[in-house]
Image: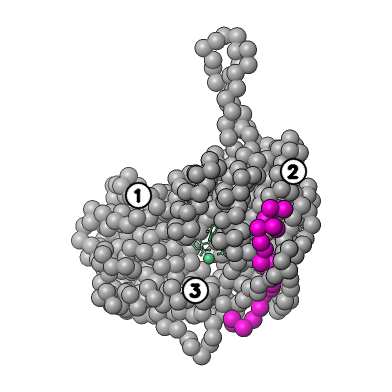
């Protein structure tokens, strides 16, 4: 690799101009593998900056929504090419800023480019239907209008893919955007915005404001000129956003936490299941909303499964994510580190057995925690109920598949769920009974495809879907037109 990211100031983008926060205040974004290392400085903006950004987006909206959709799409193609040509640098920044390993960061950045191309193509596809009217002299059809100004609020765990899968459809369907990324990944986010800006989007079509969630995030949600809010992040923040948006009649979309189960049936291919649990549970240091958190195993294969899992987990190399000998990076921030450590302590206190991991490296300074596997986890324990968002697997033993389904569904979340079995009836029963928006058979709980709908059930979501063709539902409103 060898590319050194320079310490740099990253500015807001408002009305086509890169500018500092009005207050002149900025904050540093650090490397969780080496917290003394600053990756870059981002603007700590105020309401004044936000207001300018929303005004710019509103002004730009009039022209942008009138442009032909294929032309809007052409900007996204350009942005995809620019993103691709900067993939190494962006991926390296991501690794240094939030600790995801370099190969994963590169994969995510390439995914960002693919999402841009997908939505560029959407600019050429149909967006309405002709519906027969009972009046023979009338033509009835639907058309879709953009919402206007859309506020995009994102978490730090997929700092490229999530902003892109919100902004690309927002733009192609004719909305203008004010984007507020998570502070922990604000530098990576700025680099994505640079790619979009370089693609030549007209000024004000995309605006970028960094700063705290309680000021810039909440300010966006409450702003009377922001017509839609698309949010991915924690459940607690999401609920509050939903209530505020509802109170002022704005459209909103929330994608939140998960407590994703993998069920291993007694006829499963055990090696396949072990690899999927490791990949789905521990890649990105377990900080995916779709990460495997509970592993529900039938008694008949419990011993074999847990032995094989343990052996492999013990072999995982933890490091800074930049070097080949680190399969897993640190937790993304000090907060995450303390939160995950707290859950590990809670697991022990409540009587689960820690089979391996959960160690920290005090001598290394970085926010490292080795992958942890708990045994004897029961449904009532905190580690079986709350989202941990870290490298922690909870093994739960069940007798029957019915008990496995019941256990899997016995949480408030419903994002992703997997079953490992070689039996088609069991697969079909699982597909019917599981309460999850993403249902996987013989595949890991994480790892979704950009052309398919994405989202959760229960408390994981506001029940709309993102990505693929589903994105149009949030980013547009249908007009039913009758012409006589
Ligand atoms: P978070 O703390 O909820 O923050 C998400 C975003 O909201 C950040 O940009 C944050 O800003 C902002 N924010 C904070 N308070 C706000 C407020 N009062 N009003 C408006 N915006 C506010 O989540 P996170 O810690 O970044 O991310 C981890 C969470 O995201 C996990 O729970 C995970 O499950 C979830 N997630 C879900 C999905 C999914 O698709 N279902 C995907 C990925 C992650 P600052 O943090 O910069 O202050
Ligand atoms: Mg946060």
Say which quarter of the image contains residue 370.
Answer: bottom left
Viewer-proximal residue among 484 and 364: 484
Say which quarter of the image contains residue 124.
Answer: top right
Q: Position of residue 200 (x, y in %)?
A: 79, 51
Q: Residue at x 47, y 54 (%)?
A: 240
Which is more N-terminal, label 1 or label 3?
3
Q: Which residue is mark 3?
A: 335
Q: Which residue is mark 1?
A: 435
The residue segment tinted magenta is: 34-53
Instruction: List the single residue furthest toward the top.
Output: 136
Q: Residue at x 45, y 50 (%)?
A: 461
Residue 474 appears in the figure: yes
From this view, report whether residue 458 is shown above or below residue 388: above
Instruction: List the single residue furthest toward the bottom.
Output: 363
* Label 3 element class: helix
Q: Which residue is mark 2?
A: 59
Which is more N-terminal, label 3 or label 2?
2
* Label 1 element class: loop
* Label 2 element class: helix
From this view, report whether residue 88 is shown above or below residue 237: below
């Amino acid at each position: 690799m060898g590319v050194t990211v320079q310490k740099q100031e990253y500015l807001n983008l408002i009305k086509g101009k890169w500018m500092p926060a009005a207050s002149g205040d900025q904050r540093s974004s650090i490397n969780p593998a080496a917290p003394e290392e600053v990756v870059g400085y981002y603007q700590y903006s105020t309401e004044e900056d936000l207001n300018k950004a929303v005004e710019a987006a509103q002004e730009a909206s009039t022209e942008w929504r009138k442009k032909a959709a294929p032309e809007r799409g052409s900007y996204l193609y350009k942005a995809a090419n620019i993103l691709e040509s900067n993939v190494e640098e962006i991926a390296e920044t991501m690794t240094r800023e939030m600790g995801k390993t370099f190969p994963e960061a590169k994969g995510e950045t390439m995914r960002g480019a693919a999402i841009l191309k997908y939505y560029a193509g959407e600019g050429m596809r149909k967006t309405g239907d002709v519906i027969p009217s009972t009046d023979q002299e009338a033509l009835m059809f639907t058309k879709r209008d953009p919402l206007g100004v859309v506020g995009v609020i994102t978490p730090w765990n997929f700092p490229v893919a999530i902003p892109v899968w919100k902004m690309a459809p927002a733009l192609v369907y004719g909305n203008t955007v004010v984007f507020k990324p998570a502070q922990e990944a604000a530098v990576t986010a700025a680099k994505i915005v640079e790619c979009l800006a370089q693609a030549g989007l007209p000024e004000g079509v995309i605006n970028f404001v960094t700063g705290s969630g309680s000021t810039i995030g909440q300010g966006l949600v409450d702003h009377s000129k922001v017509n839609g809010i698309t949010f991915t992040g924690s459940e607690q923040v999401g609920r509050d956003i939903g209530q505020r948006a509802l109170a002022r009649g704005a459209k909103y979309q929330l994608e939140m936490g998960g407590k994703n189960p993998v069920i291993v049936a007694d006829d499963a291919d055990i090696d396949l299941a072990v690899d999927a649990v490791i990949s789905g549970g521990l890649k990105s240091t377990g900080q995916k909303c779709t990460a495997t958190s509970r592993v529900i195993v039938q008694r008949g294969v419990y011993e074999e499964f847990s032995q094989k899992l343990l052996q492999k987990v013990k072999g995982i190399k933890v490091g800074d994510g930049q070097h080949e000998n680190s399969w897993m990076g640190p937790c993304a921030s000090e907060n995450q580190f303390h939160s995950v450590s707290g859950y590990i302590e809670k697991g022990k206190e409540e009587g689960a057995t820690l089979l391996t991991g959960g160690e920290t490296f005090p001598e290394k300074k970085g926010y490292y925690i080795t992958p942890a596997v708990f045994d004897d986890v029961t449904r009532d324990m905190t580690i079986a109920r709350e989202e941990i968002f870290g490298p922690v697997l909870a093994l739960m033993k069940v007798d029957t598949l019915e008990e496995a389904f019941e256990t899997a569904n016995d949480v408030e979340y419903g994002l992703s769920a997997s079953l490992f079995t070689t039996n088609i009836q069991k697969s079909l029963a699982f597909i019917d009974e599981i309460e999850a928006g993403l249902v996987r058979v013989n595949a890991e709980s994480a790892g979704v495809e950009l052309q398919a709908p994405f989202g959760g059930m229960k408390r994981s979501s506001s029940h709309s879907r993102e990505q693929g063709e589903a994105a149009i539902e949030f980013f547009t409103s249908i007009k039913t037109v009758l012409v006589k």
